[in-house]
Each structure stands twice: as structure tokens, then as C-alpha cells.
Amino acid sequence: MKYSGFRVIKEALTGHRGWGPAWRSPDPNSEYDYVIIGGGGHGLATAYYLAKEFKQSKIAVLEKGWIGGGNVGRNTTIIRSNYLLDGNEPFYEFSLKLWEGLEKELNYNAMVSQRGILNLIHSDAQRDAFVRRGNAMLLNAADADLLTTEQIKKRYPFLNTDNARFPIKGGLAQHRGGTVRHDAVAWGYARAADSCGVDIIQNCEVTGFKIENGTCLGVETTKGFIKAKTVGACVAGSSSRLMQLAGMRLPIESHVLQAFVSEGLKPLLPGVITFGAGHFYCSQSDKGGLVFGGDIDGYNSYAQRGNLPVVEDVCEGGMAIFPMLGRVRLLRMWGGIMDMSMDGSPIIDKTDISGLYFNGGWCYGGFKATPASGWVYAHLLATKEPHKTARAFRFDRFSKGLMIDEKGMGNQPNLH
Amino acid sequence: MIINHPLLGPRDSSEFVYLGDANLINRPNWQEDGALEQFVDYGYLRDNIAGVHRELWFHEYGDRSWLVVTRDTVSHEITEVRLASDVAIKEGR
Ligand SMILES: Cc1cc2nc3c(=O)[nH]c(=O)nc-3n(C[C@H](O)[C@H](O)[C@H](O)COP(=O)(O)OP(=O)(O)OC[C@H]3O[C@@H](n4cnc5c(N)ncnc54)[C@H](O)[C@@H]3O)c2cc1C
């Protein structure tokens, strides 16, 4: 069924009896050409582009819970392509371009809103770093705009520019950045993949791999054994747990990141703002709640809930730049499990086991990557060659000293 | 989380800095054959266990001692806390 304004009016006049489920719920076949493990944004996008762009068929997505129950439905929804390093920036810009055409492509309202993102600058050294980053973005055909304090004051009069410790000395803006309705991304890809013939199998956990003579022949699941020519792992925070079943140890630690939503307020914040001295980022949802977050809790966790010290730290960051938030009440908060890699950048690569591929290590920045991650992973699975924007995301970059470390923090996942 | 410091008693986890898997105590010997592979493993690969995990915490806003904390990464329950120096001596480091 094609969604359209006409359709909405027609259904409104006929009692909404014509809407069907957005995707089927098939039982798994005994065999597929491609099995994608993990029905998050990345897994669903991979299946969609495999079918649509790379003309492959016999594809299944296996999800242990329900579509959208993982990080794709837990994040703070920010999209941007403001990276510095050559290994990253072309990939994230490719992703932002895909976001720009996504709703037409999927025939689904994902509420892609290019309201702009502003990274605040608080010191001269930080300005130098942001100028360099802005130039790197421009060289990769992304947009970047260095704003003065005066320009920022005009757009955001409520920001505390004169904070004694962290005055605002300007900002790096990316006007094409913004936010996207996160669950709608999962649902939109699921519906579009399903209509290309992809089987989306929920409540189907992968519990093991069948590997013989170094070749992966399929996966054991809670719904029985499924044979597959090509298996693509794509389970974000559960990456180490899953790949351990194939005997692999990964350059990844799992950490919890919390997100927060305030009570609904009148329109207040026109774009996304990030604090440069602490870690705090904030946007306002269309329902009016301020959506914000900060640092990860910082210790290995699979608990999907965080602790209070980080709540305090995040709220302090918010108060430092938006003193007006002092009396706003927090409505909801939750946590998600991040696959924090050793250099803060993702891995999209084949493994040493023939037929088994890996996509993970997204840290807390994988939502913005969803369309490109799906596209380049589908490229790798279908052609066995990495996509030109994803050549650096290899496993062996750690042993070869080719880390993609945006922040220069070294092999300490909780600092990325 | 409350970490029961062996010398100072129960302390809030926010006084501590987290380093990671306690196997980091077992730094490879750089003179051994195959040291390069061992260091890649030591520096970059982790078990990343969902369940009982031994890990290093540093009491930065306290007595600046290193602790080995045994904690469940699924429930956050802490079952044992020892001085890292004691653990290292016991393991023959
Ligand atoms: C609080 C928070 C805020 C964030 N903010 C942002 C942001 O503002 N911008 C941004 O770009 N990114 C952000 N992120 C990161 C982003 O959400 C993730 O990097 C991204 O969603 C991960 O990819 P995914 O959607 O495929 O993961 P998920 O949705 O987690 O998908 C993985 C799926 O695999 C399934 N699975 C796991 N194990 C198995 C198994 N054995 N068998 C079958 N299925 C399995 C899981 O159930 C899950 O559904 C944030 C994350 C969190 C938690």
C-alpha cells in the first residue's frame, strides 16, 4: 500500500478500515542467501539496500526482540556529518545525503528535520580545532559555518554566553544537520524491506553459528537452524556476546548511555545545540519535550539503565548553558547499550570465517549512520568488496596502527 | 553504585575512574617471542563479558589506590573488592 495525503483523507472518511500491517510476520524458511542478525536500524537498512540497490533476494532479518526495541528506538535522534578524519567524513556525508532523500525513497514519514546543529566554542584552542574540522568538512563537500558570539546570541538569546568559566566564544554550525524520528526509521526501513520481499523475523534470537572448516554455514536460533550462504552480524551493543559464539574477541566494550526527555514546553529551541566544555546535547521534539543527553556512564554494562552521578553531570551541563532550564521537570529517562570501540569508530568488515561479516562498534553515534551503514554493508555482503566510503572501517586497523581516533583518546573506550 | 573500598569502606562510584578489564594487570613481556601479537591483544581486544566481570577502578577522589572490583555487568551488583596491588602480588606480578 502506498502512503499519501490522499490515502489519509480517504481512510479518514471510511473509518480507517483500509490500513493493513506495515510488514508481514512470516515463519523463517530453512534456507536464505542472506541472513542479517539484528533488526535495528542498521540491520533493516542493510536488508533493504541488499534487495533494492543490489538486486539480491532470499534475505531474512532475525531480531531477538521486536523491531525498534534496541538503540534505534532509544537514541537522541541527532544526525550530522561534522567529522574531522578522512576515514570517517566521506561516510557520514554520504549518510546525510541519504537522509535527505529518505522519506521519498521509503514512502514513509520519518520526520527528517534539518533544523541545524550548533557546536559551541568556549576557548581559543577549541576555535582552532573547530575551524580545522569545519575545513575538513568543506573539503568533503559537507556544509560548515563558523558563527560569532553575536550571531549565536541573535538566534539563541537564552544561551548563557557570559558564563564565568565557560563563556561562549562562537560555534561551528552545520545547517543540514538535525533530527529524525528514530522509531519511524526502523518502521520505514522494515516496511520498505518487507515490500521488496525481505522476511523480517521477530522474537528469533541467534544462539550459535554453524561453522565448518572455517566457513559459516548458517545460524542456530530460537526458531531452529537456518542455513545461509552469507551471514551479516549487526547487533550494536550485543556485538561481543554474539561474535563470542563464533569464537571471536572484539575491540569493543559495551557501555550504557542515558537519554532524557523533559516535560512538554512551548517551542523554544530551534535546532540542536551541543555544549563544548562538558558533554551535553539538546534538541526539542515536535511534541515539545527537550530531548538531551551527555556522557556514557563509563563502565562496562549490559543493564540498559544507568546511574545517578551521570544524571547529575548531564543536568549540570544543561544548566551551564541554559540557566532557564532550572525549573523544567524531567519526564523520562532510559539507557541503551553502546558498542564502544577502541578508537571510537565503527567496523564494517569481513571476518576470518568465510561467509560471516560484521558491522558494529558504533559507539553513541550510529543513528546518524543508519542509511549509509545499511548501504555500505549491503555493498560488502553483495559484492564482497568494501564500499569506497567505508574502506577504513577494518578489523586490522588496530594491529596495523591505522586507528580512526577522532578525539585522539587512544584505546580507552569510555573516553571516546 | 557503592564500591566497598577495602581500606576506606563504602564509597560512591563517582569518586572513582574506570579503566576496564582487570586482565590489564597482566601486561605481556615485551622481550618474549610473539610480543607484538600479545600487545595487540592486550591493547585492543576484550572479552566484554555480560555477567561477572573483574575490572580496574582508580580511587581518584580518594586515596588514589587501584582496586579490582568484581561486578555483574547485567545487574551492576558488586560482589568483591580488593586492592589491585594484593591481586597483582597474588598473581605473581
Ligand atoms: C541513549 C542513546 C542516545 C543516542 N544518541 C544518538 C544520537 O543522537 N545520534 C546518533 O547518531 N546515534 C545515537 N545513538 C547511537 C545509536 O542509537 C546506535 O549506534 C545505533 O542505533 C546502533 O545501530 P542499530 O540501530 O542497528 O542498533 P539496535 O537498534 O540496538 O539493533 C540491534 C538489534 O540486534 C538485536 N540483537 C542482539 N542480539 C541478537 C541476537 N543474538 N539475535 C538476534 N538479534 C539480536 C537487538 O535486539 C537489537 O534490536 C544513541 C544511543 C543511545 C542508547
Image (cartoon, coloured by chain):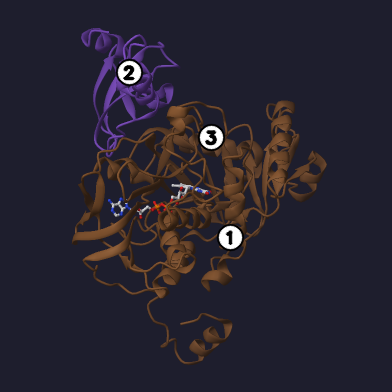
Chain colours: A brown, B purple
Which residue of the protein is positioned furthest toward the bottom in this rendering?
A14
Seen at 58% across and 71% down, the residue is A104
Q: Callout 1: few (<14), some (14-19), or many (20+) C-alpha neighbours within 10 Å?
A: many
Asked if the residue at tag 1 contacts the one at tag 3, i.e. Cβ–Cβ closer than 8 Å, the answer is no
For residue A12, the mark is: none
Seen at 76% across and 34% down, the residue is A169
Closest to the camera, between mark 3 and mark 2, is 2
Look at mark 3 in the image and give the residue it sits on: A404
Q: Nearer the viewer, residue A398 or B70?
A: A398
Q: Chain of mark 3?
A: A
Q: Quadrant of residue B42?
A: top left
Left or right: A119 with respect to B18?
Answer: right
Disc 1 marks a residue whose amino acid type is Trp
Q: Does B47 sit above or below residue B26? A: below
How far across and how far down the image is residue A262, in percent? 53, 51
How far across and how far down the image is residue A321, in percent? 65, 39
Q: Nearer the viewer, residue A388 or A24?
A: A388
For residue B34, the mark is: 2
Closest to the camera, between mark 3 and mark 1, is 3
The Cα–Cα distance between marks 3 and 2, rounded to whole angstroms, is 25 Å
Q: Chain of mark 1?
A: A
Q: Are marks 2 and 1 on the same chain?
A: no
Look at mark 1 in the image and give the residue it sits on: A99
Seen at 52% across and 90% down, the residue is A10
Asked if the residue at tag 2 contacts the one at tag 3, i.e. Cβ–Cβ closer than 8 Å, the answer is no
Left or right: A156 with respect to A366?
Answer: right
Q: Chain of mark 2?
A: B
Closest to the camera, between mark 2 and mark 1, is 2
Disc 2 marks a residue whose amino acid type is Gly
Helix, strand, or loop for circle 2? loop
Q: Quadrant of residue A202?
A: bottom left
